[in-house]
Amino acid sequence: MGQHTVTATDENFAELITAGQPVLVDFWAEWCGPCKMMTQPLEEIAEANKSRFGVAKLNVDEHQGVATSHGVLSIPTMIVFADGIEKKRLVGARSKAQLEREIAEFL
């Protein structure tokens, strides 16, 4: 992944979403064009907010268990978790500015 985003897996997912700060998990796949469009905006948001907000990326092809258990039916899907609880779900690609507006309450 990027320099400031974390790779989420079936094994570390529960720990990531309960780590004490809100975390946005990007459910993506290598073959997904709109998912690739989100790489840079998510990296920039992760870098700018690293002390208070996490960004993780979970490849749905490699870690289907988590995606299935959270009802991810299309990608990209981005879910903000706080204290292990889903707080916001965003489906589809968007600009960095739009994404920042939609998650502003967590930043």
Image (cartoon, rainbow, N blue to C red):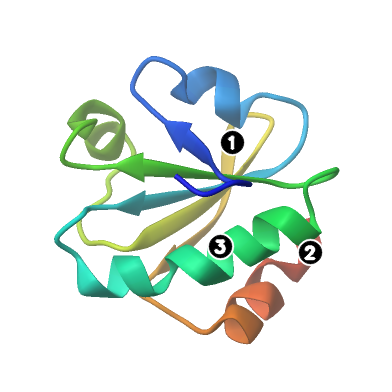
Residue 4 visible to the viewer: yes
Secondary structure, mark 1, is strand
> Residue 25: where, in percent of width, then height?
49, 46
Residue extending farthest to the top is 11
Q: Which residue is mark 3?
A: 42
Task: Say which of marks 3 and 2 sits in front.
Answer: 3
Residue placed most toward the observer, 97 or 47: 47
**Residue tagged by mark 2?**
105
Seen from the viewer's position, the closer of residues 58 and 106 is 58
Q: Residue at x 45, y 64 (%)?
A: 39
Left or right side of 17 for 78 = left
At a point 58% along the width and 30% down the height, the residue shown is 17
The percent position of residue 61, horizontal first and vertical second, equals 15, 40
Q: Residue at x 22, y 53 (%)?
A: 29
Q: Where does label 1 land, which residue?
A: 85
Q: Quadrant of residue 52?
A: top right
Badge 3 crowding class, 10 Å Cα cut-off, few under 14, some 14 to 19, many 20 or more, is many
Determine whether the residue tagged by mark 2 lies in a helix, strand or loop: helix
Rounded to the nearest angstrom, the CA distance separating label 2 from label 1 is 15 Å
**Which of these two is toward me, 31 or 92?**
31
Mark 3 or mark 1: name the one nearer the start of the chain: 3
Which amino acid type is shown beneath numbered disc 2? Glu
Q: Is residue 75 left or right of residue 77?
A: left
Q: Is residue 28 above or below residue 98?
A: above
Q: Is residue 8 above or below residue 47?
A: above
